Amino acid sequence: MAKEFRFGVGVTRVSTRAKLEDDARRAEALGFDVLHVPDHLGGPAPFPVMTAVAMATTSLRVGTFVLNSAFYRPALLARDVAALNDLSDGRVELGLGTGYVREEFDAAGIPYPTAGERVDHLKLTAAHIAEHLPDVPIMIAGNGDRVLRTAARFADIVGFTGGDRAATGDEDPLGDRIGFVRAAAGERFAALELNIAITAMPLDSSGQPDLTIPRISLPGLSDDELLRHPGVLSGSTTEIADRIHGYRDVYGISYVIVQMRHAEAFGAVIDLLR
């Protein structure tokens, strides 16, 4: 049975509290379910931002997409998550990742662990949160085998990047990764919520997305390949809604995240999907 759609919107910049609160209330009114904050030095601090959003809204959930788990000790992170969950009346979702930007570790004065050590710490963190805060949904996002095995074991929500290449007649990178999680999760798979993050979509009637962000994150792909990538949406509002229906029908993906710059345009898509 297909899961109901859920929609998230990400905030990457915060100028004033008033602007943040207005954006959060507008996202709630547009039908978004969750507001997400990333975790990068130089960006907004996740927990103060999520607290402000929770205080300004009534139903909008708050989450991280995704927390650099290597920056946190599990017990201390659990304390902060528990406090915010109490203050928000249970509206917290915790997104976890390994952390990958070496310059941020250097700036924080934290030794940069190996890839394996970062995945080990992610696993330790997820296990601790799952044990001590079982009512807080955990999202784990990534693309590598070890991260997705950890997600299959501990997560409630699995975030997929869409793969590092566009689908062709012979290859389906997104389908491959979902199949990997299905095999690793076993009986747990049916209960998992599958997510994809959108990095570009049209903001006007042209149907053409701004490819600036996917060009940076996927530098090896041509513009034609980027337009076929699952994380890039193009076409009319109806065509985008149809494509997202396809994500659910084909892959089981029912949770879609866009960025705040996409919120108004994607609100029209939400209207067609509900």
Image (cartoon, helix red, strand yellow):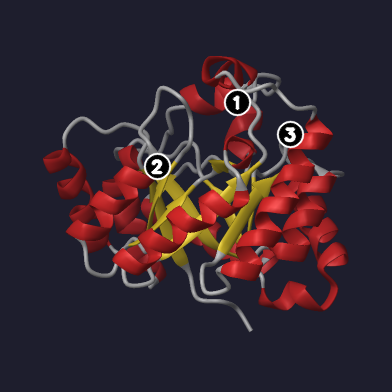
Q: CA distance from mark 2 to mark 3?
A: 30 Å
Identify the residue at the far bottom of this view. 1
The answer to whether 271 appears left or right of 255 in the picture is left
Nearer to the camera, 144 or 161: 144
* Residue type highlighted by circle 3: Arg
At mark 3, the secondary structure is loop
* Residue type highlighted by circle 2: Pro
As drawn, 112 above or below 259: above
Q: Which residue is mark 3?
A: 165
Residue at screen point 50% across, 61% down: 242
Q: Which residue is mark 1?
A: 217
The answer to whether 116 appears left or right of 166 in the picture is right
Q: Residues within 10 Å of mark 2 (few under 14, many from 20)?
A: many
Q: Can the viewer see residue 202? A: yes
Q: Can the viewer see residue 240? A: no
Nearer to the camera, 127 or 1: 127
Please state, as top left, top right, bottom left or bottom right, where the N terminus lies in the image.
bottom right
**Mark toward the start of the polypeptide (2 vs 3):** 2
Residue 192 placement (x, y as % from top left): 66, 70
Q: Which residue is mark 2?
A: 46
Q: CA distance from mark 3 to mark 1?
A: 11 Å
The answer to whether 248 appears left or right of 124 in the picture is left
